[in-house]
Image (cartoon, rainbow, N blue to C red):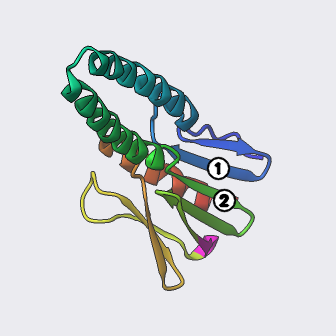
Amino acid sequence: MSNTIYQFAQESGSVIQWQLRRNCSITPSQLAWLYLSLCLVSLGIGGFFWFQGATLVLVFAGFEVVVVGVAFLVYARHATDGEWISLHGSKLVVEREFAGRMERAEFVRQWVRVEPKSGDHSLIELSGQGRSMEVGRFVRPEMRQLLAREIRKALRSA
């Protein structure tokens, strides 16, 4: 076990893990409850005006509920997006989830290259053995170089 302190990683025994996630202020289940309450209020108000003779209010309330529902669905679909990088033993494992689709790549520690994709603020490309994967989407662009240095340092340590 090393005494290295990482800014982005957690060290547990001989395993070093980076969990890079989207910064979401509300979980998908909380969002569902919020949407349900919004539906009840909007459709309740629309129903009240329907019975008062203003029939178009309910139509527009229904349209509003559908549009907001689509926007919430797009948000919820990406709320669990993230990148997980783990280094244990001679393997570097990279997993990336985007919109419910998981990608995974394993690299031999000694053969991994860590480079920016194009410039200083671009994504970080991890490559080796004919494979590559980009990481760093959920890190501020100005912090990506620090993340790349941290991964390089962990790869070099024994």
Quarter location, residue 8: top right
Residue 37 placed where, x, y %? 47, 22
Q: Are marks 1 and 2 in contact (CB under 8 Å)?
A: yes
Residue position marked by numbered label 2 in the rendering: 87
Q: Which residues are magenta?
A: 105-110
Residue at image position (44%, 54%) is 148
Q: If you read the primary sequence from the N terminus, does the residue marked by circle 1 or circle 2 appear first?
A: 1
- From this viewpoint, is residue 96 visible? yes
Question: Please, what secondary structure does the residue beneath circle 1 have?
Answer: strand
Nearer-the-camera pick, 52 or 44: 52
Q: Please give left or right for residue 93 compared with residue 129 in the image.
A: right
Q: Up-down: is 141 above or below 107?
A: above
Residue position marked by numbered label 1 in the rendering: 17
Q: Up-down: is 117 above or below 122?
A: below
Nearer-the-camera pick, 132 or 33: 33
- From this viewpoint, is residue 25 visible? no
Residue 29 placed where, x, y %? 57, 34
Q: Please give left or right for residue 28 compared with residue 43 in the image.
A: right
The kind of residue on which mark 2 rests is Leu
The kind of residue on which mark 1 rests is Gln
Quarter location, residue 109: bottom right
Nearer-the-camera pick, 8 or 63: 63
Q: Main secondary structure of the magenta part?
A: strand
Q: Please give left or right for residue 53 compared with residue 25 in the image.
A: left
| Residue at the bottom extreme of this rendering | 130
Question: Please, what secondary structure does the residue beneath circle 2 have?
Answer: strand
